[in-house]
Image (spheres, helix red, strand yellow):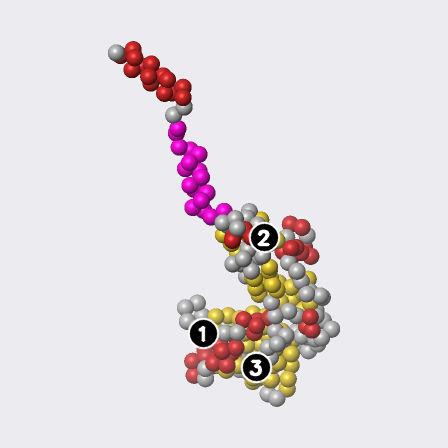
Amino acid sequence: MSEEFEIIAEKREVVGKGSSRRLRRLEDKVPGIIYGGKKKNPQNITVMHKDLLKATENEAFFSHILNLNLDGAKEQVIVKDMQRHPAKPKILHVDFQRVSKDVAIHIHVPLHFINEETCVGVKKQGGAISHTMSEVEVSCLPADLPEYIEVDMLKVEIDQIVHLSDLVLPKGVEIIALTQGEDHDLPVVAVHTPKKVVEEEEDTTSAEVPTIGDKDEDNAEESDED
């Protein structure tokens, strides 16, 4: 993992909705919590909003082991949950989970789709790419955590679907959904025939075209009238 993230946090002694609102409004701080790991008790914390918001601008922040400095004591954590304001660029609450080097973690990792412009189904067959997923939940030891998982679209043909089981995973990493059975082997991305082309083909097929027999009957009716 090439990125390094450090979060400066402080212990929070006073909790409750009123306290949280004051922290956000008057001190520009985000209330949060740290839990899990070998320490049994969760710890309420605060983090400066501007620092946390800036860190979230980097996609890697959500799929990395973070160094959390809590009043001078350092812990390794991952982001487990984050509550955001529905209309404003504001973080309302954040949950961090402690990690141990010998205990597997569950975390969402982003998918990076490569070679889309040179994809066979697009460049040679005129298809269009449709994404179903942008991230996937994996299980691995902290040392094996990938920053992202690549999905190579180069050889994907038109009307072909890439499923979770088709993804190439780094060593020591497994997809949570695939451990739950074949029914959870969900589609990730597909190359399909563009909708406009399909509609044009349907219009051509459904159009009424006079047959030779029809023409003959028309000619016969005209002769009778003469």
- N-terminal of the pair, mark 2 or mark 1, is 1
Residue at x 30%, y 12% (from the top left corner):
223
Dividing the picture into quadrants, the one containing residue 138 is: bottom right
Q: Which residue is mark 1?
A: 90
Magenta-highlighted stretch: main secondary structure?
A: helix
- What is the distance, in whole Å, between disc 2 and disc 1 at their CAs? 40 Å
Please determine whether, in this image, residue 138 is positioned above or below residue 34. above
Q: Element at badge 1?
A: loop
Helix, strand or loop status at disc 3: strand
- Give, as a three-letter code, the residue at label 1: Lys
Asked if one can make out residue 192 in the rendered structure from this viewpoint, the answer is no
CA neighbours of label 1 inside 10 A, class few (<14), some (14 to 19), many (20+): some
Closer-to-camera residue (73/31)? 73
71 above or below 106? below
Q: Earlier in the sequence, mark 3 or mark 1?
A: 3
Magenta segment: 193-209
Residue assigned mark 3: 7
Query: Across the whole image, how many numbered discs are drawn on residues?
Result: 3
Q: Which of the 4 quarters of the picture holds residue 210?
A: top left
Q: Residue at x 42, y 36 (%)?
A: 204
